[in-house]
Image: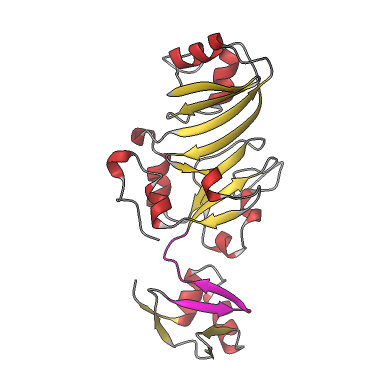
Amino acid sequence: MSKQPLDRILQSQGFGTRKACRRMIEDGEVSIGSETVSDQRAVFETSGLEFTLFDERWAYREHVYIALHKPASYECSRKPSHHPGVLSLLPEQFTWRDVQPVGRLDHDTTGLLLMSDDGAFIHAQSSPKRHIPKVYVATAHDPVTPALVDLLLAGVQLHDEPAPLAAVTCRQIAAHQLEIVLEQGKYHQVKRMLAAAGNHCTALHRAAIGALTLEALNLDAGAWCYLDQAQLDLLAPDAERGNTPAT
């Protein structure tokens, strides 16, 4: 954190080009505390800074860490092709900040999706070397059987993988549903594993990443929230707890 001129602060928070931010300030659209700031060269300490722009209140954030309850029929891409992109569910300034999904969920998969503009965080969360468990609820076309659960725990062979892939844990939770925990994060892994086990996945929902659950976040489909430090810590493996970046 450091002292910065107001126009640069607004630009860093995704409110447009520096020229556009200067115009907002000059037009009296920005206030700090109860005072309107019209001097674009005014300098402020960014740590703990809150400001109001167009009557909406914002807190300065060096980086943003976001949890989204992804609905179906949205693509995890900044350049979607067949469906709306998940960025359309967020305020426009996050696009200016280059916020992007951490990994991907298929357009028809729902559930917990992380998003950030922090490249180091995105890389760390996406790295298969960290073995971060992800919890999925899969709906199967055919009834779930003990044999199916046992097979997914033992490992199934996928066509393009050198060795069988196994679930970390797997349990039946309804006649046609199972909860499956994976660490690898391979392409379409849950769907392909179910197919390799002789069933077919008709719906898929990601319920948790690490120890961070969508239920605890209490987000409706399409809703999002900032993640605080305690929530970020839940995303790390046990050995790394407390070393995640501060918001």
In this rendered view, identify the residue nearer to me: 225 or 159. Answer: 225
Verify whether residue 11 appears in magenta. no
Of residues 201 and 29, the one nearer the viewer is: 201
In this picture, residue 83 sits left or right of residue 12: right
Q: x%, y% of residue 242?
A: 30, 50
Residue 129: which quarter of the image?
top left
Look at the picture and state if 104 lies above or below 181. below
Position of the C terminus by quadrant: bottom left
Locate residue 77, reporting x and y percent: 59, 45
Question: Which residues lie in the magenta part?
Answer: 49-64
Residue 66 position (above or below residue 76): below
**Residue 42 location, quadrant:** bottom left
Which residue occupies 43% across, 61% down? Answer: 63
Q: Is residue 185 above or below residue 14?
A: above
Residue at left offset 46%, top offset 75%: 9
Where is the N terminus found, in terms of image quarters? bottom left
